[in-house]
Image: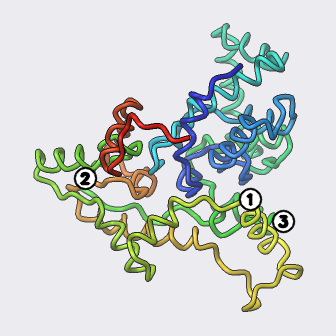
Amino acid sequence: MTTTTGYESLDPCVHCGFCLPACPTYLATGDEADSPRGRIVLMRALERGELAADDDALLAHLDACLGCRGCEPVCPSGVGYGRGLETAREQLFRTRGLPARARWVLSVFRKPLAWRTLFGLARLLRQTGLPARLASGSRLGFAMGMLAATDGSGRTGAVGSRREQSGGGISPARSRPLPSAPVRVTMLITISRQYGAGGSEVARRVADALGWRLVDNDLVEQVGARAGLSPEEVAGIEERTPSFIERLAQVLATATPELFPPATGTVPELSEATLVRITEAVVAEAAAEGRAVLVGRAAPAVLARERDALHVKLVAPRPFRIRVTAGRLGLDPRTRSG
């Protein structure tokens, strides 16, 4: 039986959506199920037994993940997506075995001449522009979209526009573009951390040693001030995961407003999307002066494209995090509930 160690690394996820711009498969398809956030929902369902390991749709979405872990450095909650994915794939492998297509791909990569020839042909095909035009949700279209996404031209907006024109029903949180202009900085350090790993203390020491500004809890206060919320309310929104019924209602209201009309007659924007945009603006302004150490608050995601930014992810052993968290909450770490 698969242990839950890998799945537990997914627990910090609060579905904030900051991982979406960092995911190449989501940028290529625009499909929520092909994003880290969507795959985490699928992996949790697999862990709980709500989805069977032989479910074809589950396999398709998890198998499409490149395993690049580009979502991890930009995650403000320190989600261990890669460990969860490894555990899920191990469970799928024990149930289904290795498909013939996967065995063929692995055999190609064992022969340098074969994969070098294949990559050379792929580059020539990409230069024709055909992959960008053939990108779709089919298996072939997905492959074409992934190939087109490797050109580094940033087609996020184009993908979103095609989906919106076709009635795909992308919610505001999914269709929002990346920040239009990069932040001009001299040098920055962003720190994402697991809860209880001591991120604030490490950031304070680094800022003191360098003589730089420390930007930590004041980010929450600024976001709250612009959103008309208290810092506690901002933290509550970020840490709360919407229920399945709420997410379903939001999707239905966005896709079919004639059947689910809101009180004002227009589809309301998700509070999640509003908070994300406010957070992006606050982080960008805090980073504009440079020479700063920014802790959490999605700073790694907002500043992901900055060449002068060093992104650090702080992790700590579980016993250490339990001890720190228990001390913070005034609990005895040796006491177990239930």
Q: Residue at x 28, y 58 (%)?
A: 185
Total marks shown come to: 3
Return the x and y of residue 328 as percentages of the image width and height: 31, 50
Quadrant where the N terminus sits is top right
Instruction: Indicate the amino acid at tag 1.
Output: Phe
Whether residue 329 appears in this view of the structure is yes
Name the mark on residue 293: 2
Q: Which residue is mark 1?
A: 244
**For the residue labelled by badge 3, is the local secondary structure a helix, a strand or a loop?**
loop
Return the x and y of residue 305 as percentages of the image width and height: 43, 51
Instruction: Indicate the amino acid at tag 3.
Output: Ser
Q: Is residue 260 above or below residue 7?
A: below
Q: How is the image coloured?
A: rainbow
Nearer the camera: disc 1 or disc 3: 1
Nearer the camera: disc 3 or disc 2: 2
**For the residue labelled by badge 1, is the local secondary structure a helix, a strand or a loop?**
helix
| Front-most of residues 40 and 73 | 40
**For the residue labelled by badge 2, is the local secondary structure a helix, a strand or a loop?**
strand
Q: Is residue 331 left or right of residue 172?
A: left
Q: Quadrant of residue 281?
A: bottom left
Nearest to N terminus: mark 1 or mark 3: 3
Name the mark on residue 166: 3
Q: Residue at x 78, y 64 (%)?
A: 248
Quadrant where the C terminus sits is top right
Nearest to N terminus: mark 3 or mark 2: 3
Q: Is residue 289 left or right of residue 114?
A: left
Nearer the camera: disc 1 or disc 2: 1
Q: Quadrant of residue 290?
A: bottom left
Q: Residue at x 73, y 23 (%)?
A: 91
